[in-house]
């Protein structure tokens, strides 16, 4: 069975600092994808970044980067230069094999402070 | 704006009733997924359709059903509603099951 674990229920970071949100995963599949989504208080789910299991380089999208450590089964999200608008719930998710669904973690609530 | 539309945005109904949630995927996306987000269960996959055919079922109750129409829009039907069905229901779409899924704004269902 596939499982995503996010051990940080809540995080605080000061504006302009970098923050790392942890995500570990468990799967026996060789082919899988890892995703991060942002959910602001308004409720929508916003796709941030994707890492494929065979990608050799860590994914980056603007201020977001994914620190992919395959042997440790971790896919941490790094947000550089945090902004007040980054305050939201962040979900790590995994797609495996047939790609029919995403399995989500429980999320990390990030609060960016002045 | 992800390009995925969902209607209605909010729905308030009573126990025992039936409701239909509607989703239009992004232009060109053949896959539609439904998810339920509740406080106690988190984000749970319900069902996946690809080009009109059901591809996978997750934790979807027998009281719930879905379909994808030839124009690729999808509907999720929830019947005999219970208090515990109150949740945020998301539709997502992707061009291919292996690609990232883009989520609609969700339908917030409240069962009283």
Image (cartoon, coloured by chain):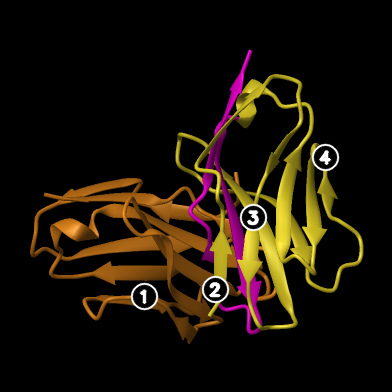
Mark 3 belongs to chain: A
Q: CA distance from mark 3 to mark 2?
A: 18 Å
Q: Which residue is mark 3?
A: A23
Instruction: Give SS at disc 2.
Output: loop
Q: CA distance from mark 4 to mark 3?
A: 20 Å
Q: Which residues are magenta?
A: A87-114
Q: Which residue is mark 1?
A: B59
Q: x, y percentage for residue A48?
A: 69, 48
* Chain that is coloured orange in the picture: B
Q: x, y percentage for residue A86?
A: 63, 31
Q: Main secondary structure of the magenta part?
A: strand
Mark 2 belongs to chain: A
Shade of chain A as shown in the rendered figure = yellow
Question: Does the rendering let one see residue A102?
Answer: no
Instruction: Give SS at disc 1.
Output: loop
Question: Does the rendering let one see residue B37?
Answer: yes
Instruction: Give SS at disc 4.
Output: loop
Q: Which residue is mark 2?
A: A101
- Left or right? Give the position of B21 relative to B35: left
Is the same chain shared between marks 2 and 4?
Answer: yes
- Left or right? Give the position of B65 relative to B5: left
- Is residue B62 positioned above or below A77 on the image? below
Residue at 53% x, 80% y is A1
Is the same chain shared between marks 4 and 3?
Answer: yes
Q: Which residue is mark 4?
A: A62
Which of the labelled discs sits on residue B19, or is there none? Answer: none
Q: CA distance from mark 2 to mark 1?
A: 11 Å
Q: CA distance from mark 4 to mark 1?
A: 35 Å
Q: Earlier in the sequence, mark 3 or mark 2?
A: 3
């Amino acid at each position: 069975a596939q499982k995503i674990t996010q051990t940080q229920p809540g995080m605080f970071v000061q504006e302009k600092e970098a923050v790392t949100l942890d995500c570990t995963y468990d799967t026996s599949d060789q082919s899988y994808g890892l995703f991060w989504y942002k959910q602001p208080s308004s409720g929508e789910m916003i796709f941030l970044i994707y890492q494929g299991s065979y990608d050799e380089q860590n994914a980056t999208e603007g201020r977001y980067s994914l620190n992919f450590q395959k042997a440790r089964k971790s896919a941490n999200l790094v947000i550089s230069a945090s902004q007040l608008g980054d305050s939201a719930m962040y979900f790590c998710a995994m797609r495996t094999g047939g790609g029919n669904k995403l399995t989500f973690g429980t999320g990390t609530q990030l609060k960016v402070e002045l | 704006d992800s390009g995925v539309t969902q209607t209605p945005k909010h729905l308030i109904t009573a126990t025992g009733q039936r409701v239909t949630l509607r989703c239009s995927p992004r232009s060109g996306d053949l896959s539609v997924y439904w998810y339920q987000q509740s406080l106690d269960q988190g984000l749970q996959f319900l069902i996946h359709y690809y080009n009109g055919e059901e591809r996978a079922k997750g934790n979807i109750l027998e009281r719930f059903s879905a379909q994808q129409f030839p124009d690729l829009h999808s509907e999720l039907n929830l019947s005999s509603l219970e208090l515990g069905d109150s949740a945020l229901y998301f539709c997502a779409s992707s061009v291919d099951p292996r690609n990232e899924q883009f989520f609609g704004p969700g339908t917030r269902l409240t069962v009283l």
